[in-house]
Image: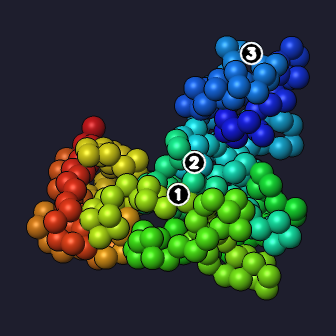
Amino acid sequence: THGHPDHVAAMGQFEDAYDVYMSHHDLAMARSFKESMGFALDLSALIDVHEGMRFDLGGWVFDVYAVPGHSVGSMVLFDESRGLLIAGDAFGCNRPSISDSLWMQFPGMLPIDQYLGSLLTIRAKLAGRIKTIYGGHNDVPMRGEAYLDALQVAAQRLVDEGEGVLVPSLRPTTAWQVVEGDRLTDPNWAAINVAKGSCLSTDYRAIATLALVRCGTHIIAIAPRMMLPALAPGEVAQTVCVTPTSSAATVHVDGHLVGSGRPFRVQAGQSVTIVVTAADQRGMSNYQLVMSNE
């Protein structure tokens, strides 16, 4: 699922007989662990894995989704027929016995405002379909999406309120964390470990980005210029919804104020400009959406 040492150390035991897959986004990181820890692993034999791939294991069919955050190359695997998600460390875990969390405190892990976009995107793609989550470190599987609800609330609180929501982490004690729920009484509690001073890409009041763009049933990759899918014959417009990363940010589409998650229409061949303004009224990001008419 990703290139951290506790997830790649034994891959070399399979390379002689099987194809072994890992996102090449994590190759440099895995190489550093191989060299420092002496793993018997041929990194040149690793086949790249990316979103959209499917593994049919005979009765178990897993679709691959990218969830960058815990590592740039973090991937999860979803079995549609069972609603079963193999999550690796993409969402962390919440063991009450050994106080655990989503680890986002080390260099190379994404700022929480960027990770929030990854979390909202994968949740939109799998909404209502997840029945069981197998994390990389939980004692037992997590049922349904209640844990992800709590994780999303924790991430959003840090993005919206800044480092004032952080408390000292119990594990490791060198980190700080934002917590949602009580670990001793709430089976769906969630916490995110971060490094204070570097857990957001900018001051929380200056965050002016989009976290999620929906076009009909499509989830659009976020970039300064975004191509919307072509309209089917007979369609005259497509409904688009955007979600800013910060709850305090405002969004204007072609100069008109649009609420978070509120739909607007884009005609065939039309281009619209989206401007996100941060809570401090100084931070600003511009995006352009183009509806293909091919």
**Which is more N-terminal, label 1 or label 2?**
2
Tell me if mark 1 has few (under 14), some (14-19) or many (20+) residues whose alpha carbon lies within 10 angstroms of its own: some
Q: Note whether residue 253 is visible.
A: no
Mark 2 in CB contact with mark 1 (< 8 angstroms): yes
Q: Which SS class for mark 3?
A: loop
Residue drawn where x is 77% and y is 51% of the image: 136
Mark 3 in CB contact with mark 2 (< 8 angstroms): no
What amino acid is at disc 3?
Asp
Q: In the image, is 41 to the left or to the right of 3?
A: right
> Where is the N terminus found, in terms of image quarters?
top right
Q: In the image, is 67 to the left or to the right of 184?
A: left
Q: Which of the two residues, 84 or 39, is positioned nearer the viewer here? A: 39
Q: Which of the two residues, 55 or 158, is positioned nearer the viewer here? A: 158
Residue drawn where x is 21% and y is 72% of the image: 280
| CA distance separating discs 2 and 1 | 7 Å
Residue matched to label 2: 106
| CA distance separating discs 3 and 2 | 25 Å
Tell me if mark 2 has few (under 14), some (14-19) or many (20+) residues whose alpha carbon lies within 10 angstroms of its own: some
Q: Position of residue 222 (x, y in %)?
A: 36, 49
Residue drawn where x is 25% and y is 44% of the image: 225
Number of numbered labels in the structure image: 3
Residue matched to label 1: 195
Q: In which quarter of the image is residue 20?
A: top right
Of tags 1 and 3, the one toward the viewer is 1
**Which is more N-terminal, label 2 or label 3?**
3
Q: Position of residue 105 (x, y in %)?
A: 57, 54
Q: In the image, is 98 to the left or to the right of 44?
A: right
Tell me if mark 3 has few (under 14), some (14-19) or many (20+) residues whose alpha carbon lies within 10 angstroms of its own: few
Residue matched to label 3: 42
Q: Which SS class for mark 2?
A: loop
What amino acid is at disc 1?
Ala
Residue drawn where x is 64% and y is 26% of the image: 32
